[in-house]
Image (spheres, rainbow, N blue to C red):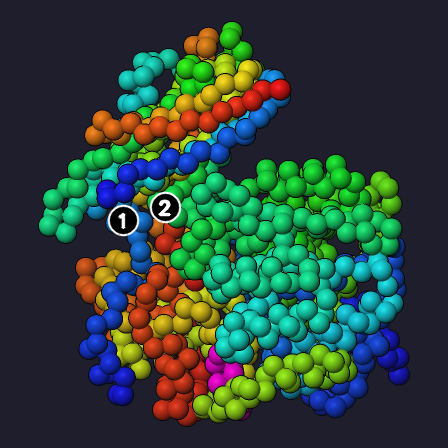
Amino acid sequence: MAQRAAQTRRETLIAGMASFAAAAIAPSLALADAAAVEAEIKKLYGDRKAEAGRIKLDVPQIAENGLVVPINVEVESPMTAADHVKSVHVFADGNPLPGIVSYKFTPESGRAAASARMRLAQTQNIICIAEMADGKLFTAKSEVKVTIGGCGG
Amino acid sequence: MVSRREFIQAGLAGSALLAGSGLGSIGRLAAQQRLSEAELLRFEPLGNVTLIHVTDLHAQLVPVYFREPSINLGVGEAKGLVPHITGKDFLAHYNIPAGSPMAYALTSEDFAALARNYGRMGGFDRIARVIKGIRAERGDRCLLLDGGDTWTNSWTSLQTKAADVVEAMNLLKPDAMTGHWEFTLGAERVKEITDSLPFPFLAQNVRESEFEDRVFEPQKMFERGGVKVAVIGQAYPYTGIANPRWMFPKWTFSLKDDDVQKEVDAARAAGAQLVVLLSHNGFDIDRKMAGRVKGIDVILTAHTHDALPEAVQVGTTLLVATGSHGKFVSRLDLDVDRSGVKGFRYRLIPIFSDAITPDAEMAALVKKVRAPFEADLGRVLGKTDGLLYRRGNFQGSLDDVFTDAMLQVRDAEIALSPGVRWGGSLLPGQDITFEDVTNACALTYPNCYRTSMKGSQIKAILEDIGDNIFNPDPYAQGGGDMVRLGGLTFTVDPYQTSGRRISDLRLARNGQALDAGRDYTVAGWASINQATEGPPIWDVVGTYLQQKKVITPRPLDAVKVVGAG
Amino acid sequence: MSNKPTPRVRVPASAKKDEIIEIKTLISHEMESGQRRAADGKTIPRKIINTFTAAFNGKVFFEATWHPSVSANPYQSMFFRASESGEFAFSWKDDDGSVYESKAKLTVA
């Protein structure tokens, strides 16, 4: 066929819908899992229990780009000297390493809220844990889907 | 004798005569006589605001045949609900007689036969006529809103970088629009056009990716019929996933209830008595959003191409679904006072091109913008002896033409064709022109690649796309239909979880199971990756059609759907 | 690697007393994760910015520890309760010991 010869020309090997985000980030290393995240939290807080609530974890349900996934965390708190959020740790259970970011807040922060952007190797859970001035812990979890994309319409 | 006004009652059904007598007794002429423009436009006005909605025109300036899907599965909470009802079930649900004009317009039942009777639908000149008619009647109460997917996916639009459609739309004088495929013109061109539009391009969910600055106005307040109406724009939230992000690398899209709520609250604070979300989310996302964001009166839906003859109510929010390709114009009359919406009347107006007089000014403009391309558009590439269409969750006879073309012309073992929901239909016996082909593939990233993929990669792609369509949470759905496969057969269980939907992948030519570890030669088009190489898909399909001459569609049995949920 | 990381900060120039203001920061940096391999199969060594601090009139009010999963050209936003006029000092600490800084003045009316 006429176009057969043209095929010998070097054509891009980027497959149509197959740019796997994981390949861009971590081609060979084992990925973390839920247990790895639990172990990290245990390192920080031992056996102290964390409650659900107070945290608003804002991540997209589907990542637009696995290399740049926005994450906004806000913890409900008056942020006074007596009652404020001390720290927030963010983990992911499907990346090469479980840690994403850790924040230290002060009453001068005014609001215990911060936004950053992260790389996600695959569809996975984002877990965050917040420690209050009185030592109470709160936790929240949300899944982010990392997709190959394309074909929409 | 049944009087004329009964033939199309309240924008819904056909006549008892038509229903009772089946197809045999009506010819094309009789059918057209029963479709009078006056009846199509008949509407008992209500209240002080009229919303006119057009959407997903996909740059179709002239009338088309467009067959609605026979398979459009709903998952999760949407299972069994409109718009996930098709064919006879749809007709029964809305009490539409089989064989009636609305049965033809809204379903796939007897499509080829009814198409011969009722003719093509849409066309900017007919749409203009209908809109002018409504405006003449309703004066300053009207707001014309365009839901997007307007500027792209025709040959003339591709050649003029949408200048043809933009000029035609400007003549319709919309009050606002939002978008999705528009972005595939590239950020620079989109900005160039939107900066020059005589109306706002609204998109509260598009931000510059560094500091999250707004790219477009989020909303606009209008005063119509003495009512303050806020229109909030919501662009397709997954544009950056479904389409090539490299074409608008500095823009980021989002789907956030909180952001929409902020806009609604701001609109109310500014005195809005009526809040309209001009949305390109897609119907299922909009239905979910209507239950989560408080204070939206009307959502004008788009993207998923659903055409529903009645507005859907979620709490106090009305959802309108206007279909695609210019087949319909929605008219929603609202009675609004200080305390809100008191009443509404809705009609999905079918644009039967043989029954509606073309607006002369628009017809002249359409002729002018098409003139330089007429020779190309009319070039006959082949003929079909069966019905060719695209819509449906898994397969379309027109998609088979595309995948067969890629397998043959690109000498591939497997072909992938995107599950887009645009592209007209062709009737048995019809010539296939270059315009017909490009109406189904004119986009700005048309290269038909040829590459090698492992069996496991192909399975992963199918699972990924399957989850984009059948994830039970609409916010986790990426839109569109399933990727079309050439050279492969498979079984799909839409109600399974991600990674478990696709099974029994086999090569169509010999029935052999797809080998996860083997490399296969794969051809495809509409890759979202930059620098994809290969001839444009219309050349590939054109070459194939010229070799093949006559297309005989085969049974669509390559995908076996299992699982009742 | 060739370009020196450049910070960019968006902070209001003025605020009312006790107003809570949002601060947005960006810095150009590849954030090499230490988990990628070069064409020759060798792991590309980790080089990220590991700490970001925001201080006002010399007192740190927000600190972030960044791990290798933080995206290239890292973005960080945070809030601050304005109490008096003064100067912000933002700093980014690199794995290689470099510290990148940016300052901004705030007038409290």
Identify residue type, mark 1. Ala
- The residue depicted at 49 percent of the width and 47 percent of the height is B208
* Image-based side of C98 in relation to B249, left or right: left
* Image-based side of B5 in relation to A53, left or right: right
Image height of B113 relative to A67, above or below: below
Q: Is residue B414 visible?
A: no
- The residue depicted at 34 percent of the width and 14 percent of the height is A45
Q: Are marks 2 and 1 in contact (CB under 8 Å)?
A: yes
Label 2 – label 1 distance at C-alpha: 9 Å
The number of discs equals 2
- Front residue (pair B145, A149): B145
> Which mark is first along the chain, 1 or 2?
1
- Crowd class of label 1 (few under 14; some 14 to 19; many from 20; radius 10 Å): few
Chain at tag 2:
A
SS for dot 1: helix
| Residue A66 badge | 2
Residue B455 sits in quarter: bottom left
| Residue B379 badge | none
The quadrant of the image that shows the N terminus of chain A is bottom left
First to last magenta residue range: B429-439
Identify residue type, mark 2. Gly
**Magenta stretch: includes residue B438:** yes
- The residue depicted at 72 percent of the width and 84 percent of the height is B354
Instruction: Name the residue tied to disc 1.
Output: A24
